[in-house]
Image: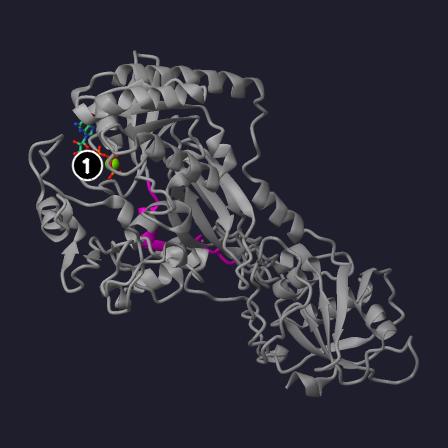
Amino acid sequence: MVSSSSTISFTNAFCFCPHSLARNKPIPKNNNNNISINPKEKTNQNRKLNLKNAPTSISSATQGGGDATTYTCLPPKDDFLIPFQNNPISEVKLSDLKPPKNEKGFGKRSDFELESEDKNGNGGFDYEKFELYEVGSDSDYENDDDFDDFSGEDEEILLGFEGVDENVNGENFDEDNVFEGITEKEKEKGVPAVMRCFDRAKIYVKAGNGGNGVVAFRREKFVPLGGPSGGDGGRGGNVYVEVDGSMNSLLPFRQSVHFRAGRGGHGHGKKQNGAKGEDVVVKVPPGTVVKEAAGKGGVQGDLLLELLHPGQKALLLPGGRGGRGNASFKTGMNRVPKIAENGEEGPEMWLELELKLVADVGIVGAPNAGKSTFLSVISAAQPAVANYPFTTLLPNLGVVSFDYDATMVVADLPGLLEGAHRGFGLGHEFLRHTERCSVLVHVVDGSSQQPEYEFDAVRLELEMFSPELAEKPYVVAFNKMDLPEACENWISFQEKLRSCGVEPFCMSAVKSEGTHEVICVAHRLVQEVNEASKEGATGPENLNHVAEMLNKQRTAPINEFEISHDSDSNTWHVSGSGLQRFVQMTNWRYIDSEKRFQHVLEACGVNKSLSKLGVKEGDTVFIGDMELVWHDADNSGPSSVRKWAEDSVK
Ligand SMILES: Nc1nc2c(ncn2[C@@H]2O[C@H](COP(=O)(O)OP(=O)(O)OP(=O)(O)O)[C@@H](O)[C@H]2O)c(=O)[nH]1
Ligand SMILES: [Mg+2]
């Protein structure tokens, strides 16, 4: 492999010929770009070197700038099924599990509770014995095109609870082997699609291609030699990503996956330039992380943007430049240029969006501890509350107002179980939402058998997820103090935590007693964290860095290229983003384009480097997407001028 910043040599004039352009291009060997701009063999594919038939201007039905488009897929599925381990035949829709809306606190019991009481005979679920798992393949999701589109795989997700101690056949359940051999991705599949789509999405974005320049000449009465008048193509539309404060999930991306900016309009005669393509703005909720989608080998893509605040707008993909018309090629040497460029192709990529809620306080705790009840009494939020685990399947946000100036956003998260890191319960799926919280509130069910153990288990899960998360300041709220069991447990719980240097608070969320103290302490901690972060604050970050990097790649000098040789297929590959862009923008309809192409290869040293490396007559050479055949036409020494080989064009 040779890198070259080649010197310009006009004496050594080897030539390339386009050759069997319909062939597939072998995969280029050196692609070090972080951002993949997928070149497509489109414009050059139909190349005909028949200049007599080449039109002098390109007629198009769409002369104006193109419209931006998004594509709509099927609507999301609302329900998913819960099969029971004890009774595999019975399937209950999740929507059926919800208790009546007015149920809050104790008293009424939902059908679900009664049903579970029948089955377990213990008056409700023993949530420590449940886990999520993925089952069979006969599902409503099977034909869900949208689902396929989103994940790229045929998959079916059901939420199920499975007895930990004993399975259907009465065999002992081996806890350690629950997820043996199951990859992270598979564990993730165990979460219903609606829940995954809430905070994850995969979308395709493409900036608009530039419009083509045209060849035209001024023809007017009394102006016999009007000169070239072909206008330039318009610039393609840009792709922006903007934070929309009114959004709180990535669910809309289940329906809109493809975002394409408009193409630039083609140039016209009379030196009229084409219109600019329409921009496309991808709206995301605050707290969205934008990553390049994982590559084919599952290699995690680069982190591109982190958008936290409403109104932030980043230029992600800049539209392609418009091709120049022949008026732009007029020089003293060539006053009637018959050459125009294609528009530059707009970059495209698949993006992975991940939402991390932006909240000041995150409420964590075991299932059924009273987290949602706590949120409902400290804020105007009305999350579902019920006496069974995993009532909350998606995080809820609430705003706590202290006075006119002081407000605080609080997030109530789905419950955590011991072993969540191995996929128990809902796993760690939602813990990422606490990463942006400044403070955590641990709600502990005081009426449980061992509140200390429950608290320790949740702390351990936080640590397993991220040590940084475990280091966040936190408040411990011992809940359900209105129940006698909780009162009994309180003293020993308090002593245990005090011995570890933590001062717990007790409260009864359902009676709104002690909740104010807890939230005031959390607010004070939030203020302290904010003060500390203000001190270490840096200047405003540049949100357009991706577009700037792409522009830098685009404007790479044409004489920076690499040559590699594939001895198996005996092909040469010349790669370099400047050269590739030049090939893509060359419009082969015009004979002057070929001359210019040969001239540029000569001038930037490609010919010289190839002949130094030992390219032979008839060898195939790829330059970007262009397949060419090397010809030593005259064999009369290196300074001789080689002819364009007509036969290879056919
Ligand atoms: N006695 C009593 N019951 C409470 C208290 N707080 C919550 N509960 C009850 O505990 C049950 C669970 O409450 P939720 O707020 O849904 O608990 P959660 O932690 O959000 O549960 P998941 O969302 O499933 O993780 C409900 O029946 C509540 O009425 C309390 O202070 N005292
Ligand atoms: Mg809840």
Q: Can the viewer see residue 388 in this picture?
A: yes
Give how far across and how far down residue 506 sits, in percent: 28, 19
Residue positioned 45% across, 24% down in the render: 473
The three-letter code of the residue at mark 1 reads Ala
* Count of all numbered marks drawn on residues in the image: 1
Between 38 and 184, the one nearer to me in the picture = 184
Residue 361 position, x and y percent, is: 37, 26
Residue 226 at least partly seen: no
Magenta extent: 249-266
Left or right of 618: which side holds 523?
Answer: left
Q: Is mark 1 within 8 Å of ligand 2?
A: yes
Q: Which residue is mark 1?
A: 384
Please tell me in which quadrant of the rendered image residue 125 appears.
top left
Q: Residue at x 39, y 48 (%)?
A: 200
Disc 1 crowd rating (10 Å Cα; few below 14, some 14-19, many 20+) is some
At 28% across and 54% down in the image, what residue appears?
A: 165
Residue 571 versus residue 517 in the image, above or below: below
Residue 263, image x, y percentages: 47, 56
Judge whether 585 appears above or below 434 on screen.
below
Q: Please tell me in which quarter of the rendered image ligand 2 is found.
A: top left
Q: Is residue 316 left or right of residue 280?
A: right
Q: Nearer the viewer, residue 385 or 28?
A: 385
**170 versus 493 height, above or below:** below
Q: Position of residue 255 (x, y in %)?
A: 31, 54
Q: Is residue 258 magenta?
A: yes
